[in-house]
Each structure stands twice: as C-alpha cells, then as structure tokens.
Image (tube, helix red, strand yellow):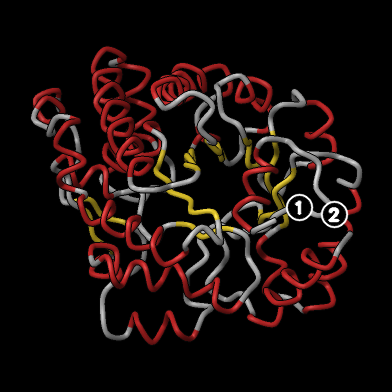
C-alpha cells in the first residue's frame, strides 16, 4: 500500500494497521532548508512561484516518512484574487491593503469566475507536484472557510477581539450574507480548480470558527461550509478543521465532510466514539509538544495512538499547525513513533 493509498483508505474509514500521518503547515521556520529558501525569496514570492512553492511543499517529505503533502500556499490568496491584497506586518500578523466597510466595497469585489485565472500559479504548483509525487503520496489542497476569510477582510487583518466582524454579523446580516455569498462562490471555484489540477483531498480551515457565539456558528460559518462541500464532486474527500468548536462536532459531521480535524483540547477517542462511523477523524497532538523533548513527544504520541486502538478512520496529525520553534528531533520522534506503531 502506498502512502497515498493509506491516506485515502483512512479518509474512507477503512481499518489499517497504523494511521497515516501528515502535519498541518508542514513547511516553516523549523526546517533549515526552508529558512535558506526564505532568505532568498519572500513568503509571497514563494507562494506565487510554482517551482518554489512545490519545493517548499516537498521539503518535509524528503526528511520525514509522511503519507501526504499539503500545498504550500496561503488562505488569503482568495481575498487577494477578489481585489483585496494583503501583506505581513513588520511587527507580526496580517494586514489587508484596506478594510471592507461598505456594501459598495463588497459589490466591487471580483466575481468568482475570476478566481481560477488569477490563482493560476496555484493550479500550476499542484500540477507540478502531481508529476513529482507520481502517485506516491496524497496531495492535499486547502483554503480558508468563508467566515474565517471574512474576519480578515472586515477587520483589516489580524485581530485580537474580532469586534468589527461580530458587529457586522449582528447589525447588518443582509450585507454580511452578501459578502459570505461571494466568498462561498469564490471558494467553490477555487476548490474545483485544485481538484482538477490533481488534489486528492481538500482541507477547509475554519480557524476562527470558535470566536463566534455558539448559537450563531451555523449562520456565521457552518451553513457556508455546507454549501461549498455540496458543490464539490460527490464523495470527494474534504477535511474540515474548525478550531475551538468542539461543541459543534456533531453538526460538522453532517456537512458532507469526510474527515473532521480536531484540535488538541478534545479527547480524540471520545470524539471517535460519538461521531458517525463513516466520518473519519484527524488529529490531535498538541503542537507545543514538538518544542519539548523527543521522549515527551514519544510518550504523548503513544498515548494518543493507544487511545485510538481498534478504531478505523484515524489520520494522525497535530491539533493545529506546527510551530516555528518545533525541534527537528521531536518531529522525527513523532514520525518514528507513528510509523512503527502497530
């Protein structure tokens, strides 16, 4: 069984002798080869240059026995394709070129059918990766959820309190829905392009799903995710990751997503027992552990694996993206522990 076959079998909830493994946000400052590349090209240059994006995507696979590669890109390429560029603040965080404040600004955003052409470099990167992987590993595309993208677009970048997007949601639902309609259509076009270019699965990151009040999660976020999945090819593997939304896992299981990715605050074995048998789970080691020692990583990884023993449909992953100060020896201990566990 190839790594690609192992990953897709787990997503389909088939029993395996050990879970497949990939790591969210694989590339980063913890890899010296990434830092060497970053010294020559900016992050955005690497995202927009297929040869560089493909190189960064493949770097973790050259070091570690992972079962899937995740496209090197950024969720904010969608707002940029719609006409709202972004950059990184010198002090850290994201800054949009301007803040969405009026209905006229929303109406002026580009239509969904402009997205695939604007993001041709993503299509070209996926096609290049598909050729280089030659079926050996699963290839994952991704994008942000409409709600998560809207938070950046309305806040004007990274936010500590999300006051503007919440005010927008509660005081002008008609205009809020108009923005989410545009983002949903854009993401459908974007994900269809990724699938056509060779992605084996799509992960939707609802990174800020947990900041809206629980009773409003459906209206603010989940209904739009459901629409996206319904518009994609039937039974295509979609992974949904929504940080801080443990109370909504059952609702997420009925969005059409084949896999729910769970953050580290949940007991994954309990999640597995409470979800429908045809929905796989992914996760959920605390990424901070990769900043500690190989011994701690090995112990906690084994504890998680043993808690899932006898279950089907588990993809081993972190409970969020890998951190910049992760130690290579800890990552190696994680990979060795998962790949040798039976």
> Foreground residue, 210 or 205?
205
Tell me the tag on residue 135.
none
Percent coordinates x, y for residue 249 in the rendering: 66, 28
Residue located 51% across and 80% down the image? 31
Say whether residue 57 is left or right of residue 88. Answer: right
Say whether residue 279 is left or right of residue 115. Answer: right
- Disc 2 is placed on an element classified as helix
Q: Considering only vertical position in the picture, is 227 above or below 117?
A: above
Say whether residue 149 is left or right of residue 322. Answer: left
Percent coordinates x, y for residue 254 in the rendering: 61, 19
Where residue 299 sits, quadrant-wise, is bottom right
Q: Considering only vertical position in the picture, is 209 above or below 27?
A: above
Q: Considering only vertical position in the picture, is 89 above or below 198?
A: below
> Foreground residue, 50 or 47?
50
Residue located 29% across and 63% down the image? 47
Where residue 260 sits, quadrant-wise, is top right
Question: Disc 1 marks which residue?
Answer: 19
Decide: marks 2, 1 in contact (CB < 8 A)? yes
- Disc 1 is placed on an element classified as loop
Where residue 183 sits, quadrant-wise, is top left
Residue located 84% across and 77% down the image? 295
The local crowd at label 1, few if under 14, some if 14 to 19, many if 20 or more residues have their Cα within 10 Å, is: many
């Amino acid at each position: 069984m190839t790594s690609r076959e192992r990953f897709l079998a787990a997503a389909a909830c088939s029993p395996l002798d050990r879970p497949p493994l990939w790591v969210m946000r694989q590339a980063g400052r913890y890899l010296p080869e990434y830092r060497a590349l970053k010294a020559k090209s900016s992050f955005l240059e690497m995202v927009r240059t297929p040869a560089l994006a493909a190189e960064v995507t493949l770097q973790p696979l050259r070091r570690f026995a992972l079962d899937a590669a995740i496209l090197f890109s950024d969720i904010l390429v969608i707002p940029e394709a719609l006409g709202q560029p972004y950059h990184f603040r010198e002090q850290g965080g994201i800054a949009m070129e301007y803040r969405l404040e009026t209905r006229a600004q929303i109406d002026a955003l580009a239509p969904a059918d402009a997205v695939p052409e604007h993001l041709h470099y993503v299509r070209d990167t996926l096609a290049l990766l598909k050729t280089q992987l030659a079926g050996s590993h699963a290839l994952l595309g991704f994008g942000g959820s409409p709600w998560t993208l809207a938070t950046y677009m309305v806040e004007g970048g990274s936010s500590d309190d999300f006051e503007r997007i919440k005010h927008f949601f509660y005081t002008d639902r008609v205009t809020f829905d108009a923005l989410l309609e545009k983002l949903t259509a854009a993401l459908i076009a974007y994900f269809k392009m990724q699938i056509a270019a060779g992605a084996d699965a799509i992960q939707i990151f609802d990174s800020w799903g947990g900041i809206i009040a629980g009773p409003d999660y459906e209206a603010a976020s989940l209904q739009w995710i459901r629409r996206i999945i319904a518009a994609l090819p039937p039974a295509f593997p979609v992974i949904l990751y929504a940080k801080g939304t443990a109370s909504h896992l059952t609702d997420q299981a009925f969005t059409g997503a084949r896999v729910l990715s769970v953050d580290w605050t949940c007991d994954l074995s309990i999640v597995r027992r409470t979800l429908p048998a045809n929905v796989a789970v992914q996760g959920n080691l605390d990424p901070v552990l990769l900043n500690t020692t190989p011994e701690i990583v090995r112990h906690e990884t084994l504890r998680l694996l043993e808690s899932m023993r006898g279950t089907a449909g588990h993809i081993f992953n972190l409970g969020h993206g890998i951190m910049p100060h992760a130690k290579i020896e800890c990552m190696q201990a994680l990979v060795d522990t998962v790949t040798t566990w039976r």
